[in-house]
Image (spheres, helix red, strand yellow):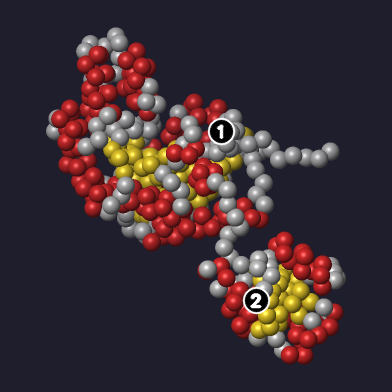
Amino acid sequence: MRLQKPRGTRDFLPDEMERRREIEARMRETVRRFGYREVCTPVFEHLDLFTMKSGEGIIEEMYVFVDKGGRHLTLRPEVTASVVRMFVNEGRNLPKPLRWCYFADCFRYERPQKGRYRQFWQFGIELIGADTAFADAEVVVAADEMLKAAGVTYDLQVGHLAPVKSLIAGLSPDLQRRVMTCLDKRDFGALEESLAGERQGADLVESLTAVAGCRSPDDLFAITGAIPEKDRITEICELLESQKVPYGLNFAIVRGLDYYTGMVFEAFAPNLGAENQILGGGTYRLAHLFGGDDVASCGFAAGFDRIMVSLGEFTTAGRPGAAIVCTPEAGMRGLEVAAAFRAAGIRTETDLMGRSLGAQVTHAAKSADFAVIIGKKECESGLVTLKNLHTGEQRGLALRDAVAEVSGFGDR
């Protein structure tokens, strides 16, 4: 019986893994320059960690199990809760603000489709312990720079929860959640139905719809008046504009989760169709749920798999590869030459099958950019013959020069 991979998972061959690692490295390097340092949390956590954050309904979407000690555990469906739990356990006494980042695989039991899998990867940052407009803006700027570095085409939208919350403050908590869900889904028909039985419901629908359509702070405050968060919202916009972040205001973004508290933002890849969100985040408060102090935090999580789908077809990453092609007369010289190429960081293969010279070159053309040929003539001269497998050009070079030629190939 030939076993297949589980539904909703994938196998990655070397070319694709090189491309994924290349994009991942760009994203890591971007946030590193902002001061974010990588953390790592367990692949499985106590089930309560996620039900406390997102409610019992999330259980249906998770891989839940009972271990041999009778503990209810789950494979992590996302990473923010784990990072905040780690902060409460390990980081409360560290100097603040904390700038942490992560790259981790997560697991959700849902119907697989393009860009959505049961095992998937998230890249994210968490800024813990800063409650200012500068903190909010830094996270958005970092997200913008990271997506640019990845090379994806995206639409960045920024909002704030305060305007909507100020308008629906008089509604019951359950109705407030329904209204925010309608806005989050841009379902204005359902919004009208939800408020149909409320006093001045039609006026509220009109105000919420108008707020959702606001594209400037001035237009917003003309509807809501001088809400307490007015200065914060204005300052965030000014900071983003000063950093030339290409964003649009969208006050219909509410992200539908109770723990978000202020600024929220999302990024979309236009070429992904309906499932086009590739990043989401905002300001939140979670630490108090897990036994810590009520600490302000801000962060984002990017769907790495959707980013890769958005990038589309790709070629092998630009790092060149070399194959050492030897005749029997070369003896140990082939291993010495291979060692020199590897010492320079070049992926280098040697023949292990005892193939003929022609067969070695044919095989090399399938896996490398250059063939480094060593025969009797090369052994006598001390040179190597470097063959460009893309153009067919070949010439005799000193080993040092051949290494330099291959090293510089990926930069052209």
- Residue 73 can be seen in this image: no
Location of mark 1 (residue): 62
Give residue 354's quadrant in the image.
Answer: bottom right
Q: Is residue 285 above or below residue 128?
A: above
Instruction: Find residue 87 and report its horizontal and vertical position in percent.
Output: 41, 49
How far is disc 1 from disc 2 in space, using C-alphas? 47 Å
Give residue 156's quadrant in the image.
Answer: top left
Q: Nearer the viewer, mark 1 or mark 2?
A: 2
SS of the residue under disc 1 = loop
- Residue 61 can be seen in this image: yes
Name the foreground residue: 367 vs 308: 367
Instruction: Find residue 281 and report its horizontal and vertical position in percent.
Output: 38, 41
Q: As shown in the figure, which amino acid type bears the numbered disc 2?
A: Phe
Q: Quadrant of the N terminus?
A: top right
Q: As shown in the figure, which amino acid type bears the numbered disc 1?
A: Met
Q: With 27 as the anchor, is 4 left or right in this view?
A: right
Residue name at image x 59 percent, y 30 percent: 111
Q: With 374 as the anchor, is 354 left or right in this view?
A: right
Name the foreground residue: 48 vs 376: 376
Q: Is residue 216 above or below residue 101?
A: above
Q: Earlier in the sequence, mark 1 or mark 2?
A: 1
Residue name at image x 82 percent, y 78 percent: 327
SS of the residue under disc 2 = helix
Residue name at image x 52 percent, y 69 percent: 411
Instruction: Find residue 157 and report its horizontal and vertical position in percent.
Output: 34, 39
Query: What's the mark number on residue 31?
Result: none
Location of mark 2 (residue): 341
Instruction: Find residue 86 and report its horizontal and vertical position in percent.
Output: 45, 48
